Image (tube, helix red, strand yellow):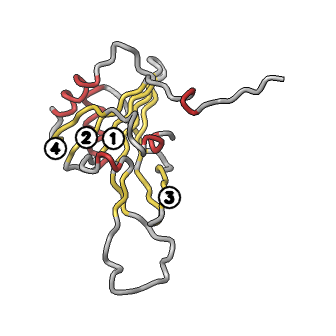
Amino acid sequence: MAIHKIQIDDFNSANYEVVAIHASIEDYRLAYFLNQTFGIQLSKCDHPIELKNKEGKSNFQLFVYDDELQDVCWSLIENQSVVSEGNEAVVGIFDAIETRSFLLPEVKKADFILKIENIDSQFNAVQLAQKITEIAFVTTAYPIEIENFKSKNNLIF
């Protein structure tokens, strides 16, 4: 009898791109501008991405558009969130201090992450980032290589 082992690397596919976006607007406004620029229909998900760490629980808002015609999935995720601690009964002098959590801590300065899945070899992330930079209130956008990020599994949802 043969024993088959499945490696986690077997499921890693290189058919997606990630773009970091620095913007001084709310998530819903950025989704609106991305919809207008690229002719897509990002809409807010009912269930945000939830991450738990030693400080507490964080919820990251998620906007998704699944283009069934071209089989491409667009996901806009906020990169920063306030940590909500599980112990609400404790009242003290430091209650006003907010602890921030990041979806991708390696790019803490980025406000949003745009993940585009099921892309083909013709896709150009640099051109996409340049077009995003033309949107009002977007400071900069650039593609990021997340293969070496410790937090890359946070983008699996």
Q: Secondary structure at mark 2?
A: strand
Percent position (x, y) of residue 30?
A: 27, 42
Q: Quadrant of residue 93?
A: bottom left
Percent position (x, y) of residue 107?
A: 29, 46
Question: Label 2: how many residues lie within 10 Å, few (<14), some (14-19) or many (20+)?
Answer: many
* N-term mark: 1 or 3: 3
- Which residue appears farthest toward the right when viewing the image? 1
Residue that carries the numbered disc 4 in the rendered image: 137
Q: Secondary structure at mark 1?
A: strand
* N-term mark: 2 or 1: 2
Tell me how far mark 1 sits from mark 3, CA to CA: 19 Å
Percent position (x, y) of residue 83?
A: 40, 64
Residue that carries the numbered disc 3 in the rendered image: 52
Q: Secondary structure at mark 3?
A: strand
Check residue 113 in the rendering and tell me which mark sits there, or answer none: 1
Tell me how far mark 1 sits from mark 4, CA to CA: 16 Å
Tell me how far mark 2 sits from mark 1, CA to CA: 6 Å
* N-term mark: 4 or 2: 2
Question: Label 1: how many residues lie within 10 Å, few (<14), some (14-19) or many (20+)?
Answer: many
Check residue 21 in the rendering and tell me which mark sits there, or answer none: 2
Which tag is nearer the camera, tag 1 or tag 3?
3
